[in-house]
Amino acid sequence: MTKIKKLQDKFFKNPKTLKYKDIKLVLISFGCKKINVKRGSHVKFKHSKLMDIIIPVHGGECKEFYKKTISSKMKKIVDY
């Protein structure tokens, strides 16, 4: 099992255990593109089947609420 596959499993089963850097890898593996924001702590991802995903990141971490929300949105569009 590859590292990305393991992260995807964690992402859908228990997203609150992941750090932002892992969530970023998972989103990119599912076809999301990171949009560079000029300033601030918010990170933006874009997917053709979803509205923009905005994640506030502080100290390499984001809140559990955002992790769960992103995971549930991705479950709707990804066959997993």
Image: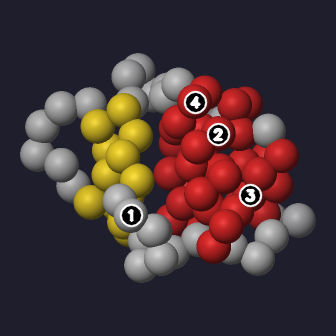
For residue 68, the mark is: 2
Q: Are marks 2 and 3 in contact (CB under 8 Å)?
A: no
Q: Is residue 42 above or below residue 2?
A: above
Quadrant occupied by the N terminus = bottom right
Mark 2 or 3: in front is: 2
Q: CA distance from mark 4 to mark 2?
A: 5 Å
At 57% across and 49% down in the image, what residue appears? 70
Q: Is residue 16 above or below residue 30?
A: above
- Residue at the farthest left position: 38
- Along the horizontal axis of the image, is 79 left or right of 63? right
Query: Can you identify the residue that label 4 sits on?
Result: 65
Three-letter code, disc 4: Phe
Percent across and percent down for residue 77 are 63, 73
Residue 64 seen in the current view: yes
Three-letter code, disc 3: Gln
Alpha-carbon neighbours of circle 3 within 10 Å: few (<14), some, or many (≥20)? Answer: many
Q: CA distance from mark 1 to mark 2?
A: 16 Å
Percent across and percent down for residue 20 are 52, 38
- Along the horizontal axis of the image, is 4 left or right of 60? right
